[in-house]
């Protein structure tokens, strides 16, 4: 059984800050844990917009705090996010994630992340080996 506390992850290599300065991802489960997915406690900073397009991963997200929205690219469809909202990027949907308030999101990725990933110029994570 794996048991981790968020406090034990903060300030370690598993506490990743995006180069864009718009998010922090506290990576609770990673590829090396052998679960077949990774689990993240993610903060999106208020007043930010992040371009994301997970071409190599599927992601499911559950909002537990804050408010924001997703704008689907290229349709422009807006989807509000608030506590209790779940969305799944089942078609590798390109989107803009905006936080009007600090968002706290629980994110699950398949395939799992190794922990070292950051978004590339397209907003995607690369698939990395251990």
Image: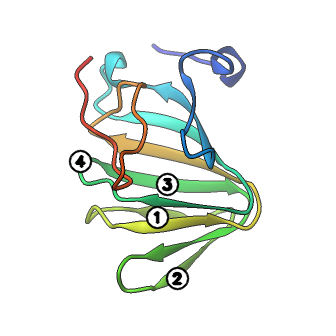
Residue at figure coordinates x 42%, y 54% from the top left: 60
Looking at marks 1 and 3 on the same chain, the residue that comes earlier in the sequence is marked by: 3
Task: Count neighbours of disc 1 (C-alpha within 10 A) and say few if under 14, some if 14 to 19, many if 20 or more.
Answer: some
User: Which residue is labeled 1 in the image?
Assistant: 87
User: Which residue is labeled 3 in the image?
Assistant: 61
Quadrant housing residue 9: top right
In the depicted structure, whether residue 33 falls above or below residue 106 = above
Task: Count neighbours of disc 3 (C-alpha within 10 A) and say few if under 14, some if 14 to 19, many if 20 or more.
Answer: many
Residue at figure coordinates x 28%, y 39% from the top left: 126
Q: Distance between the residues labelled 4 and 3?
A: 16 Å
Relative to 96, is 65 on the left or the right?
right
Quadrant housing residue 32: top left
Looking at marks 3 and 2 on the same chain, the residue that comes earlier in the sequence is marked by: 3
Pointers 1 and 3 in contact (C-beta within 8 Å): yes
Looking at marks 4 and 3 on the same chain, the residue that comes earlier in the sequence is marked by: 4
Q: How far apart are marks 2 and 1 (CA)?
A: 13 Å
Q: In which quarter of the image is the N terminus?
A: top left
Looking at marks 2 and 4 on the same chain, the residue that comes earlier in the sequence is marked by: 4
User: Residue 111, position in %: x, y?
Assistant: 26, 38
In the depicted structure, whether residue 89 falls above or below residue 3 = below
Kindly tell me whether residue 85 is visible in this rendering: no
Q: How far apart are marks 4 and 1 (CA)?
A: 17 Å
User: Which residue is labeled 2 in the image?
Assistant: 78
Residue nearest the viewer, comparing 68 with 87: 68
The circle drawn on residue 56 is: 4
Kindly tell me whether residue 36 is visible in this rendering: yes
Which of discs 4 and 1 lies nearer the camera? The answer is: 4
User: Residue 119, position in %: x, y?
Assistant: 41, 44
Looking at marks 4 and 1 on the same chain, the residue that comes earlier in the sequence is marked by: 4
Q: How far apart are marks 2 and 4 (CA)?
A: 23 Å
User: Residue 65, position in %: x, y?
Assistant: 73, 55
């Amino acid at each position: 059984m794996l048991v981790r506390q968020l406090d034990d992850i903060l300030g370690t290599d598993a506490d990743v800050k995006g180069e864009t300065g718009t998010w922090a991802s506290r990576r609770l489960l990673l590829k090396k844990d052998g679960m077949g997915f990774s689990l993240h406690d993610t903060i999106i900073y208020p007043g930010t917009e992040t371009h994301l397009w997970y071409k190599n991963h599927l992601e499911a997200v559950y909002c537990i705090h804050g408010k924001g929205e997703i704008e689907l690219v290229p349709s422009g469809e807006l989807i509000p996010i608030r506590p209790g909202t779940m969305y799944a990027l089942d078609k590798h949907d390109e989107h803009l994630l905006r936080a009007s308030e600090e968002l706290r999101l629980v994110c699950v990725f398949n395939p799992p992340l190794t922990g070292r990933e950051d978004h590339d110029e397209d907003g995607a994570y690369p698939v990395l080996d251990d």
